[in-house]
Image (cartoon, rainbow, N blue to C red):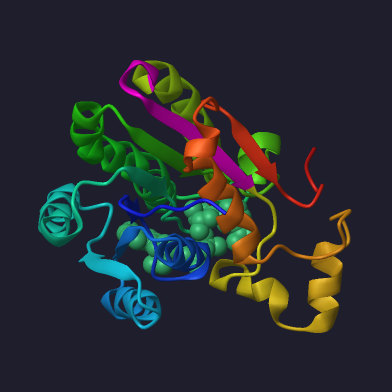
Amino acid sequence: MNSFSGRTVLITGAGSGMGRSHAQLFGERGAHVIVHDVNAASVAETVDAITSHGGKATAMVADIRDLPAFRTALASAIIPAGDPDILVNNAGVGGRRLLVEDIDENTWDDFMAVHVRGAFFATQAVLPAMKAKRYGRIVNISSQWGLAGSPSASHYAGAKAALIGYTKGWAKEFAPFGITVNSVAPGYIKTPMTIHSQRSPEVYAERIKPIPIGRGGEPIDISYAVAWLASDEAAFVTGHVLNASGGEVI
Ligand SMILES: NC(=O)c1ccc[n+]([C@@H]2O[C@H](COP(=O)([O-])OP(=O)(O)OC[C@H]3O[C@@H](n4cnc5c(N)ncnc54)[C@H](O)[C@@H]3O)[C@@H](O)[C@H]2O)c1
């Protein structure tokens, strides 16, 4: 088991679903976790879930689309937590399936602002300190749809594909500074984002039919992948996209 003792990890969108699961795992393994989300109540719940088990966590509330607010909140969070050694770009929005002709400008802008612009500027915010330390781990949360494409969700799939592009470019750009950059591409995971497919056993059974492993993923399935990529054991792995989809996309 990897220890993150002495490390600080910033997880965006850590108030819910997989982000909360990642935060709890890093907290259990000794990291000081900066718990970021736009939702203050859910940030407080994640912080409490870590600290009530003896872990270290600092709250960071900001809309990732509002860069001045994000930077100000990060500046406050690093006072107790220290500069992040690890960044998990996890914040995301899901939503209805839409055909291209039904995607309006606001919806398109919002998906790009949270997933693509958000991850870019969160990375820019932590990069100078990582470069100065000559150590860093960045994990971008993409999606199986970023790898394989998705009919009627191209606004989502396109944003997730952009994160794979960042992963490969940043891996090359940051490697001389001891910073690795990797991506995890989850398949179908049971979180609030996918709640519509969990509303009845019949709907759930239909959704998992194309998954060869025969079940939907749990948030912790993805947290273990993120933790390994963020660990010292993965020091020679950079620019990789780890497909964690139970075989749905290969
Ligand atoms: N659930 C799946 O099947 C699945 C599959 C592949 C990839 N993903 C990706 O995994 C990541 C986590 O998703 P999840 O399933 O845990 O969903 P979730 O809805 O439970 O969590 C997403 C979190 O991001 C936060 N967030 C959204 N907009 C924000 C903003 N503007 N500023 C700050 N925080 C914001 C939300 O408040 C929420 O806490 C997302 O990037 C998602 O696209 C999910």
Q: Main secondary structure of the magenta part?
A: strand
Residue 143 versus residue 77: which sits nearer the camera? Answer: 77
Taking the spot 30% from the left edge, 68% from the top edge, the residue there is 56
As for residue 213 lying within the magenta part, the answer is no
Q: Is residue 25 left or right of residue 8?
A: right
Residue drawn at x 22%, y 62% as measured from the top left? 62
- Please report the residue visible at 14 percent of the width from the left and 61 percent of the height from the top: 80
Q: Is residue 23 visible?
A: yes
Of 249 and 28, nearer the camera is: 28
Q: Residue at x 16, y 59 (%)?
A: 77
Where in the figure is residue 244, as x and y percent of width and height? 69, 48
Could you tell whether 183 is left or right of 242 in the image? left
19 or 230: nearer the eye? 230
Q: Position of residue 36 (x, y in %)?
A: 30, 62
Q: In the image, residue 206 lies at what x, y percent?
A: 85, 68
Residue range (magenta): 175-185
Task: In the rendered view, tell whether residue 116 sits above or below residue 5.
Answer: above
Residue 75 shown left or right of residue 30 in the figure: left
The picture places residue 139, in percent across and down from the top left corner, at: 46, 41
